[in-house]
């Protein structure tokens, strides 16, 4: 049995030294040391040995097992090192290549337009006022000369939460709250940016939620010419110094007289094109002189002071400024669309 163990040892060493593959190495381990391996097969014959022979054969068997296991371990370490070196060679980083810059976000085009509008009016001496988006019927309608059952309320199909509370349909309630807080003091020059809500999403130019910026000026001897000059300055800062405006008579319950404001088409510069429907003009906002009743309800004497008000949709301004034909692009979170505005 001792001779068989020695022969097995020499055979195993020769086979293990020649192996060049980790899978074959595992097969040889099973062949020599497995439960049904060659060494186990030899040791099953120890039952026929004498008591004096068993310790000697057992020692030889342990030496054979240790020699085979040691060689297997050495070979396995060698294969692992080769694999590591191969992975390092394949996955090495060329430090001379230019680095990959992380993707950076940008300001949303609507936020950018809001900031631009705010900067223009702050430069003209206005301050910013804000108010609640959930508003009472009084501030949203009645204080703006729109009593209950007034037909003009149909122009603003509303989201009511209770009989008296609704999602504001305009930022004009902030103007009323500002006038009340001023307690008749003048001058008043504020703009009111914010989200508003209307059941109006029938086409690509309307949404049930959108942004407005409204403004008011109150003081002695405020005239329509002051309104026109203010809006002309705003449009030239927003759309270019060659921009012209025109005022068209209109109707708003909270202003009298009321006007719609158009600007020369940015595409054709007033010559007429498909964008402006060959008119040369594009509508951008509504405005007018504050109705005397609105002034009176907010604590001002219309015999002593006057004022003008204007209101614009931010999405409308952004669509005209950037040539966008679908309001839904602003809310789809399409990075291909938003990425165009990073450098603006």
Image (spheres, rainbow, N blue to C red):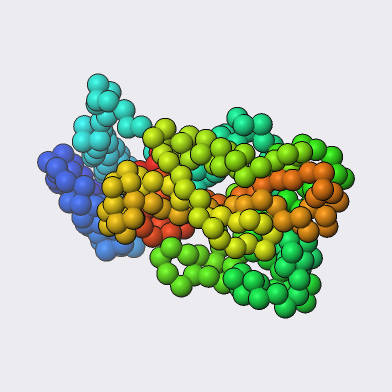
Residue 129 shows up from this direction? no
Give the image location of residue 127, x and y in percent. Answer: 69, 37
Q: Tell me what residue is drawn at x 36 percent, y 32 percent.
A: 101
Please tell me in which quadrant of the rendered image residue 121 appears: top right
Q: 222 above or below 283?
A: above
Q: 154 above or below 181?
A: below
Give the image location of residue 130, x and y in percent. Answer: 71, 48
In the rendered structure, the answer to whether residue 159 lies left or right of residue 318 reads right
Residue 160 shows up from this direction? yes
Q: Tell me what residue is drawn at x 21 percent, y 47 percent.
A: 22
Q: Tell me what residue is drawn at x 66 percent, y 76 percent.
A: 151
Closer to the camera, 226 or 207? 226
Closer to the camera, 310 or 99? 310
In which quadrant of the rendered image does the C terminus lie? top left
Q: 38 above or below 164?
A: above
Q: Tell me what residue is drawn at x 60 percent, y 63 percent.
A: 251
Q: How many marks?
A: 0
In the rendered structure, the answer to whether residue 328 lies left or right of residue 165 reads left
In the rendered structure, the answer to whether residue 32 lies left or right of residue 215 reads left
Name of the residue lying farthest toward the top:
96
Closer to the camera, 34 or 219? 219
Q: 168 above or below 24?
A: below
Give the image location of residue 323, x and y in percent. Answer: 35, 50
Please tell me in which quadrant of the rendered image residue 143 appears: bottom right
Give the image location of residue 45, x and y in percent. Answer: 28, 61
């Amino acid at each position: 049995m001792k001779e068989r163990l020695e022969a097995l040892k020499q055979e195993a060493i020769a086979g293990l030294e020649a192996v060049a593959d980790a899978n074959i190495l595992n097969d040889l381990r099973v062949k020599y040391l497995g439960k049904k391996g060659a060494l186990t097969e030899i040791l099953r014959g120890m039952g026929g040995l004498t008591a004096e022979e068993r310790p000697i054969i057992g020692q030889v068997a342990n030496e054979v097992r240790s020699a085979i296991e040691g060689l297997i371990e050495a070979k396995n370490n060698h294969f692992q090192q080769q694999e590591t070196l191969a992975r390092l060679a394949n996955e090495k980083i060329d430090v001379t290549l230019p680095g990959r810059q992380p993707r950076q976000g940008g300001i949303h085009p609507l936020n950018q337009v809001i900031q631009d509008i705010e900067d223009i009016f702050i430069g003209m001496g206005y301050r910013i006022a804000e108010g609640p988006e959930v508003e009472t019927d009084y501030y949203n309608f009645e204080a703006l000369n729109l009593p209950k059952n007034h037909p003009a309320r149909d122009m603003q199909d509303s989201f009511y939460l209770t009989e008296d509370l609704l999602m504001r349909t305009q930022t004009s309630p902030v103007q009323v709250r500002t006038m009340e807080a001023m307690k008749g003091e003048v001058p008043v020059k504020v703009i009111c940016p914010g989200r508003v809500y209307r059941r109006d999403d029938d086409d690509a130019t309307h949404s049930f939620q959108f942004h407005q910026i409204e403004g008011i000026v109150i003081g002695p001897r405020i005239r329509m010419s002051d309104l026109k000059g203010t809006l002309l300055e705003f449009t030239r800062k927003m759309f270019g110094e060659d921009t012209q405006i025109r005022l068209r008579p209109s109707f708003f319950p909270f202003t009298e007289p009321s006007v719609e404001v158009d600007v020369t088409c940015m595409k054709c510069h007033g010559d007429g094109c498909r964008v402006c429907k060959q008119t040369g003009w594009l509508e951008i906002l509504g405005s007018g002189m504050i109705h005397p009743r609105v002034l009176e309800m907010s604590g001002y004497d219309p015999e002593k002071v006057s004022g003008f008000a204007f209101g614009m949709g931010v999405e409308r301004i952004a669509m005209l400024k950037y040539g966008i034909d679908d309001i839904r692009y602003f809310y789809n979170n399409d990075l291909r669309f938003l990425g165009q505005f990073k450098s603006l």
